[in-house]
Amino acid sequence: MSRDEETIIEGRNGIIEAFRSGKSIERLFLLDGSQDGPMQTIKREAKKQGLRIEFVSRQRLDQLSPSGKHQGALAYISAHSYASVDDIMARAEASGEPPFIFVLDGVMDPHNLGAIIRTANMSGAHGVIIPKHSAVGLTGTVMKASAGALNYTLVARVSNLNNTLKDLKKRGLWFACAAPDGEEMYSQDLTGPIGLVIGGEGSGVSRLLRENCDFVTSIPTKGDIDSLNASVAAGVLAFEIVRQRRMLISKKFT
């Protein structure tokens, strides 16, 4: 992430105030071994939010710091506020449509996340769910890559994707895991309340999350490589959901 694309807060007091004002902190770097009072306060606030702290050397902090006056603490702040899973479900209910949600597992490339958010908006999805850890958050690069769609698309960030899936299943959603070895999307019913689970670059959907999905879906391909880019796969599958939903509506009126 380049420094001109992120909001950076340096210094202990600035980070403490960021926590207390409710700002969404994406990444937090602290000087390894520092144990004074303000540092302990930062650690407590990070623990409350389930934020993982990255303990680094002074040299690393110097590299990250635009001003060089980091006081042993530096944080990246989210470029956009997060919604909740309940907000996403409320939007689906208000639309009168079956819920349609993207669940992203370990997407690290901000350009991919931005492109998926754009696809979610264009396909009429009610929101996107991402994990707090081991994934990119709503950075400035993501905002740019979404081409403005982030202003209209709800994105929730959760501590545990598996628990979130289990909770949403109780609320009537079915989850489709995108993977090359799944059943072809054209032979599956994707018209009901659905969560489309997309894995990260290279690693795909994690084993446990895949096991918590209801079925595995794939895109028929003919090329010489074995998988599509995460954002491309998300787009193809999303608009198959759109196609099937429109077909279902047209059948009701014929």
Image (spheres, helix red, strand yellow):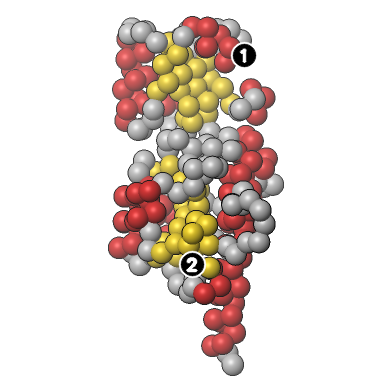
The amino acid type found where label 2 is placed reads Glu
Image spot of residue 54 (x, y percent): 42, 21
Reading the image, the residue beneath label 2 is 183
Q: Earlier in the sequence, mark 2 or mark 1?
A: 1
The residue at the point 40 percent across, 23 percent down is 53
Question: Which image quarter: residue 247?
Answer: bottom right
Rendered position, 101 above or below 46: below
Neighbour tally class for label 2: few under 14, some 14-19, many 20 plus, Cα within 10 Å: some
Of the two numbered discs 2 and 1 in the rendering, the one whose residue sits closer to the viewer: 2
The amino acid type found where label 1 is placed reads Pro
Image spot of residue 98 (x, y percent): 46, 70
Q: CA distance from mark 2 to mark 1?
A: 50 Å
Question: In this image, 82 relative to 246: left or right?
Answer: left
What SS does tag 1 mark? loop
Image spot of residue 209 (x, y percent): 37, 51
Q: Nearer the viewer, residue 148 or 227?
A: 227
The residue at the point 63 percent across, 61 percent down is 221
The residue at the point 53 percent across, 62 percent down is 218
Q: Which mark is residue 142?
A: none
Q: Which mark is residue 66?
A: 1
Q: Report whether residue 67 is seen.
A: yes
Rendered position, 253 above or below 147: below
Q: Quadrant of the N terminus?
A: top right
Q: Nearer the viewer, residue 28 or 211?
A: 211
Question: Which image quarter: residue 169?
Answer: bottom left
